[in-house]
Image (spheres, rainbow, N blue to C red):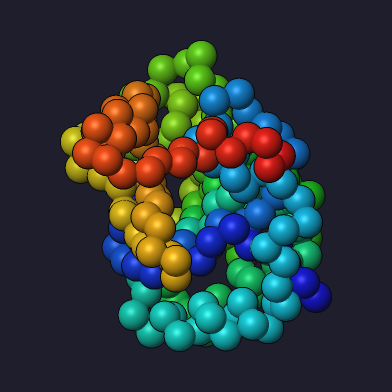
Amino acid sequence: MRVAVSRLHFPVTALGPGRRVGLWFQGCAIRCPGCVSVDTWTDGIGETALPGLLDAIDVWIADADGLTVSGGEPFGQPEALAEVLRFWRRRSRGSILVYTGHELDDVAPWLDANPGLVDGLMTGPFRSDLSQTLALRGSDNQRLHVLSPQGREFAPFDRPARQEDRSLDVMFDDEGRAWLAGIPARGDLARLRRVLTAAGHEVQMSDSIRNLA
Ligand code: SF4
């Protein structure tokens, strides 16, 4: 089996409790206006063999408090998603948080077919026309579902966002490019672009490479 992946990183601290493995699937057909991850929309790039992805995750499992899967749209690759989560369950007691742009009813058949694989599920598309006041969310229509006893660790995030919730993880890829993980507050990326550009850095935001989609 092959899986299209945008990014894989550890540790990620801005997408759930503790130090988590972050996995971003590649490909999203939902295409919310204002999405900050436009680079993850395109299908057919970032493909890799599933065993290689699992090996890469395995290196971090002993030190990780959990796995957060986002995208892109994880449920756009339903078999690969199930395989990754089954692997995590076999190898780790850490919690699993999955983000989807679909609503709960849309992914309920997958959840029924794959019981016990998801502890916390954040559902709903990003809506730039709605407010953003809640933790771990880009817009307030998004709903956090606790799907298992272990998922209760996500319940404290069902609250208004605090200052610490606005933190972002800064990471560097093999080419030395920096990228961010987390839920930026509205306008944060535009402000960051202005500051970096003024300092002489080349800045390419996700929404500036829309032609990839
Ligand atoms: S916010 Fe999520 S669901 Fe919406 S277009 Fe972006 S990646 Fe897809």
Q: Nearer the viewer, residue 126 or 152?
A: 126
Q: How many marks?
A: 0
Q: Residue at x 45, y 85 (%)?
A: 59
User: In the image, residue 104 lies at what x, y percent?
Assistant: 66, 39
Judge whether residue 18 can be spotted in this image. yes
Q: Nearer the viewer, residue 172 or 119?
A: 172
Can you say whether 61 is above or below 66 in the image? below
Which quadrant is the N terminus positioned in?
bottom right
Quadrant of res 4? bottom right
**Is residue 155 placed above or below 5 in the rendered structure?**
above
Residue 100 percent across, percent down from the top left: 61, 44
Q: Please tell me whether residue 190 is drawn above or below residue 106 in the rendered image.
A: above
| Residue name at image x 43 percent, y 35 percent | 137
Relative side of 184 to 81, left or right: left
Whether residue 161 can be seen here? no
Residue found 36% across the figure and 27% down from its top: 190
149 with respect to 123 (left or right): left
Left or right of residue 212: residue 138: left
